[in-house]
Amino acid sequence: MPHIPLGAALRTQIHNQHARQLAYLKIDYEGAPDERQFPDYNQDTIVGWIKSNAAAIKAAKASQVTSPSADKPSWDSVLWSLVESAAVYLRKRESMIKAVNAARANDFNQALQYLKEAQEYVDEVADALDCDFIQLCDFAHQSPNGSWYHSGAYCGAFVSRESDNAIIGVAYKGTDNSREVVTDLDWDPSAGLVTGAAFGARIHSGFNKGLFGQFGDDNVRPFGA
């Protein structure tokens, strides 16, 4: 994974773009974001995984969470990825409702404050990894324009704080409905829908549409200009 520092200005830009994205997030009949309830674990459980497997976490970080090859996975890196993917579920539902409502009222500074409050438990896990967490996209139950039964992305980035062996890991929530299955199966690599996405590499088509595609009448992009 390349050494790419994520400066304060870029972090602020991502946070601001995400706050504006929330104004377009679907809300269910109870007034809550249309996303899953918490699974049967919490931040203390995940931090416990990290502490009880400190050597494996250290080895994963040293390798920049890579594996020798596609058919020879590094189980240390698998553990790191599992920790990240489990942590993205741990946002506070009530605070997310407030963030969505603030964004719809065009109060994006207040939306950012509620977002910070909502991800308190995710931040605890990120801190145990010596990383910072940045939510990128919340459109898990909405289809990108032109793909009526795909799902958008629900993902965030874990950004390492140290300059040596820098890591930026993007963690997605797991598949739990037919819309996400369709997205997963659209795996043929395609060129990024945003210039420079993934450093010019070809991307899993379903994830490409969900993260870099356009949503709604205003053609909002979850990530990228």
Image (cartoon, grey):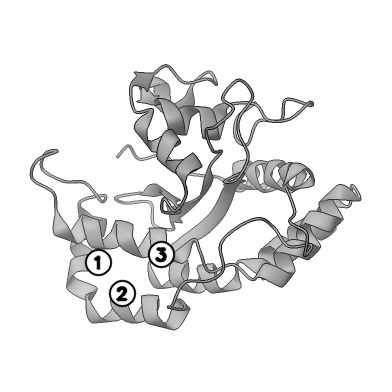
Q: Position of residue 4 (x, y in %)?
A: 41, 39
Identify whether 55 is placed above or below 19.
below
Q: CA distance from mark 3 to mark 2?
A: 12 Å
Q: Position of residue 114 (x, y in %)?
A: 75, 65
Amino acid type, callout 3: Ala
- Asked which secondary structure carries label 1, the reply is helix
Farthest residue, direction right: 105
Identify whether 123 is placed above or below 190.
below
Q: CA distance from mark 1 to mark 2?
A: 7 Å
Tag 3 residue: 86
In the foreground, 209 or 106: 209
In the picture provided, is 47 more to the left or to the right than 146? left
In the foreground, 119 or 98: 98
Numbered mark located on residue 57 in the image:
1
Numbered mark located on residue 50 in the image:
2
**Residue found 46% across the figure and 78% down from its top:** 42
In the foreground, 64 or 27: 27
What is the quadrant of the C terminus in the image? Answer: top right
Q: Of label 3 and label 2, which has the lower sequence position?
A: 2
In the picture provided, is 75 more to the left or to the right than 145? left
> Can see residue 113?
no
In the foreground, 143 or 118: 143
In the picture provided, is 89 more to the left or to the right than 105? left
Circles 1 and 2 in contact, beta carbons < 8 Å:
yes
